[in-house]
Image (cartoon, rainbow, N blue to C red):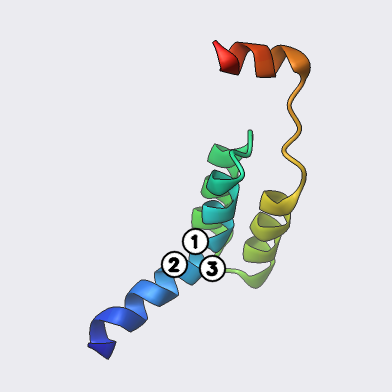
Amino acid sequence: MIEVALPILLILFYMWPSVIAQSRNHKSYDAIVALNILLGWTFLGWIGALVWSLTAARTTAAERRFLAE
């Protein structure tokens, strides 16, 4: 059981910034995922993706109207 659960938990932890960005509907989601995959293996790359995913995902009024259609 641990042979299956541990790798899944490690992958989930590694991709946590991407999960946060997706759950917050961050407008830079694709870039955050790319940063996480390409540089997440470095500690600074992972921290950068995490901080970026936690920043305010502000949208303008025009973007909100477009998304509402």
Residue 23 image position (x, y, % from top left): 55, 47
**Quick one: label 2 or label 3, which is nearer the N terminus?**
2
Q: Which residue is mark 2?
A: 12
Q: Which numbered disc, 3 or 1, marks the residue closer to the eye?
A: 1
Mark 1 closeness class: few <14, some 14–19, many ≥20 residues within 10 Å: some
Q: In what element is the residue under mark 3?
A: loop
Where is residue 68, by image quadrant?
Answer: top right
Residue 10 image position (x, y, % from top left): 43, 75
Q: Which residue is mark 3?
A: 41
Disc sitting over residue 63 in the figure: none
Q: Is 36 situated above or below 59?
A: below
Q: Which residue is mark 1?
A: 15
**Quick one: label 3 or label 1, which is nearer the N terminus?**
1
Which amino acid does the dot numbered 3 rest on? Trp
- Which residue is at the front of the view, 7 or 40? 7
- Judged from this view, the residue extending furthest toward the bottom is 2
Q: Is 25 situated above or below 45?
A: above
| Distance from Cα at disc 2 to Cα at disc 3 | 13 Å
Which amino acid does the dot numbered 1 rest on? Met
Q: In what element is the residue under mark 2?
A: helix
Q: In what element is the residue under mark 1?
A: loop
